[in-house]
Image (tube, rainbow, N blue to C red):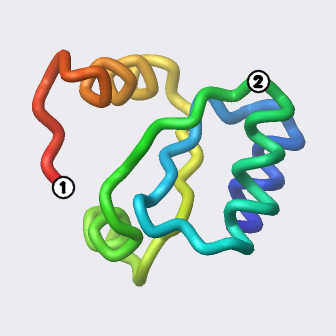
Amino acid sequence: MDQVRAALQAGTVVCVVVAADVSPRAQEKVVRLAAGRGVPLLPGPSAEAIGARLGRPGVMVAGVLDRALAHGLAEASRGGAPMEA
């Protein structure tokens, strides 16, 4: 979470994937910062599912730095492509 906050403050994050079960702390610290900076927020699966895909324990928020990946994730979240939960 701290790395995502730092990247948001540096202006390098293109979008943020937010776990369906985001904690109040992550909501307060990261989601509000992203929203305030105009960084798109994309709904994601559970923190456990995000973490499993990244090879980590539960991940509440994931900052996306690559524009093409962010575009693909945004399309998937709108139903343009299937996204596994």
* Position of residue 2 measured from the top left corner of the image (x, y, whole percent): 76, 67
Q: Residue at x 70, y 49 (%)?
A: 31
Q: How many numbered discs?
A: 2
Q: In the rendered image, which quarter is residue 37 located in? A: top right
Mark 2, other Cα within 10 Å: few <14 / some 14–19 / many ≥20 = few
Kindly identify the amino acid type of the residue bearing the numbered disc 2: Gly
Q: Which sits earlier in the primary sequence, circle 1 or circle 2?
A: 2
Of the pair 54 and 23, the residue shown nearer to us: 23
Kindly identify the amino acid type of the residue bearing the numbered disc 1: Ala
Specify the quadrant that holds the C terminus.
bottom left
In-image side of 82 versus 10 (left or right): left
Mark 1, other Cα within 10 Å: few <14 / some 14–19 / many ≥20 = few
Q: Residue at x 38, y 23 (%)?
A: 74
* Position of residue 44 measured from the top left corner of the image (x, y, whole percent): 37, 50
Q: Disc 1 to disc 2, how far (Cα)?
A: 26 Å
Of the pair 51 and 18, the residue shown nearer to us: 18
Of the pair 30 and 55, the residue shown nearer to us: 30
* Position of residue 12 measured from the top left corner of the image (x, y, whole percent): 74, 32
Where 48 falls versus 76 (above or below)? Answer: below
Q: Which residue is mark 2?
A: 38
Q: In the rendered image, which quarter is residue 13 located in? A: top right
Determine the residue located farthest toward the bottom in the rendered image: 57
Label at residue 42: none
Q: Secondary structure at mark 2?
A: loop
Where 69 falls versus 75 (above or below)? Answer: below
Q: In the rendered image, which quarter is residue 38 located in? A: top right
Where 39 falls versus 53 (above or below)? Answer: above
Q: Which residue is mark 1?
A: 85
Specify the quadrant that holds the N terminus.
bottom right
* Position of residue 64 measured from the top left corner of the image (x, y, whole percent): 53, 39
